[in-house]
Image (spheres, rainbow, N blue to C red):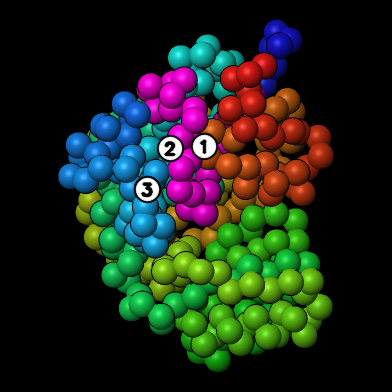
Amino acid sequence: MSIGKQIAYVFPGQGSQKLGMFSELSVQSPIIIDTFSQASAILGYDLWQLTQAGPEEKLNLTENTQPAMLAADVAAWRVCCSSKCEQPSYLAGHSLGEYSALVCAGAIDFADAIGLVAKRGSLMQSAVPAGDGAMAAIIGLDNKSVNAVCNEASENAIVAPANYNSIGQTVIAGERAAVERAAVLAKQAGALKVMILPVSVPAHCNLMQVVTKQLADMLVDIKIVTPKIPVIHNVDVMPHKDPSSIREMLVQQLYSPVRWVETIEFFASIHIDEMIECGPGRILAGLNKRITKEVPTINFSVKLSD
């Protein structure tokens, strides 16, 4: 690697989990099992067993997926650190991945974060009765068109952009009937593809406002310090040093859209040379490639073999 190469690590959130993740790598890197064991001790159940053997529907419950993804992301980071990968200039995480980024930046203790995201997942699950909310991916419409579709579909209900994932790929969230109306309108507006997503919680929309106080109260009890590495937050695409500001960003993130396109455009604008997807899968690599061709994204496991 050339001297002075600027690296950003990006951490995936829900959607990257799958049964058997890190199964082979864990044989070569026991730190993965150690990380999941730490998480299991906090949670009171065997998180590694759940990720390896399922059942899949249990792993995909938000309250289980969130600690599973946090443990996976942090395990990947620890493997990279033990392999003496390059020190990153910035970190960022997609949705739940923002918690992973803060742990790896030294802002939040891993054990505290595991307990926090498990409770966060339960809170989010309780905010909207099962079946009342929905999320849908809209492919092939620009932001202005997606906003117009949501405004027309709302009819005094909640539906809005939740994840600005990539150029021409936006996820919307809200009340199920409104999301379904928006899906129809998006197709009529020329969307290439519209998919109702198989999720149990309509994240990053105003339906989550009802549990923001509970999350804020939980965050008060969590020790947060200034990150050792700048973390770009989902809400405002900026780094924050002050612990109170970080807490506020995490509360706002619950009901605000994930501004991932702007995050990756920021990395390109400051001439980051390479992004490392620090977690299972290559979802972020796919999204990032459609945002910028200038900055490649590779999975950490590829980095290890360099």
* 304 relative position to 168: left or right: left
Relative to 51, say whether 5 is above or below.
above
- Marks 3 and 2, Cα distance to the nearest angstrom? 15 Å
Label whose residue precedes the other's in the sequence (1 or 2):
2
Label whose residue precedes the other's in the sequence (3 or 2):
3
> On the image, numbered disc 2 is attached to which residue?
72
> On the image, numbered disc 1 is attached to which residue?
279
Mark 1 and mark 2 in contact? Answer it, CB < 8 Å: yes
Which amino acid lies under the numbered mark 2 shown in the image of this protein? Answer: Ala
Task: Residue 111: give x, y in percent of width and height.
Answer: 26, 35
Extreme bottom residue here?
155
Residues packed near mark 2 inside 10 Å, few (<14), some (14 to 19) or many (20 plus): many
Residue at (55% x, 55% y) in the render: 258
* 68 relative position to 275: left or right: left
Task: Residue 160: give x, y in percent of width and height.
Answer: 56, 73
Q: Which mark is residue 53?
A: 3
Residue at (43% x, 27% y) in the render: 26
For the N terminus, the quadrant is top right
| Closer-to-camera residue (288/76) | 76
What secondary structure is marked by label 2?
Answer: helix
Residue at (27% x, 47% y) in the render: 116
| Closer-to-camera residue (153/73) | 73
Residues packed near mark 1 inside 10 Å, few (<14), some (14 to 19) or many (20 plus): many
Which amino acid lies under the numbered mark 3 shown in the image of this protein? Answer: Ala
Task: Residue 10: give x, y in percent of width and height.
Answer: 57, 36
Q: Nearer the viewer, mark 3 or mark 1?
A: 3
* 3 relative position to 107: left or right: right
Label whose residue precedes the other's in the sequence (3 or 1):
3
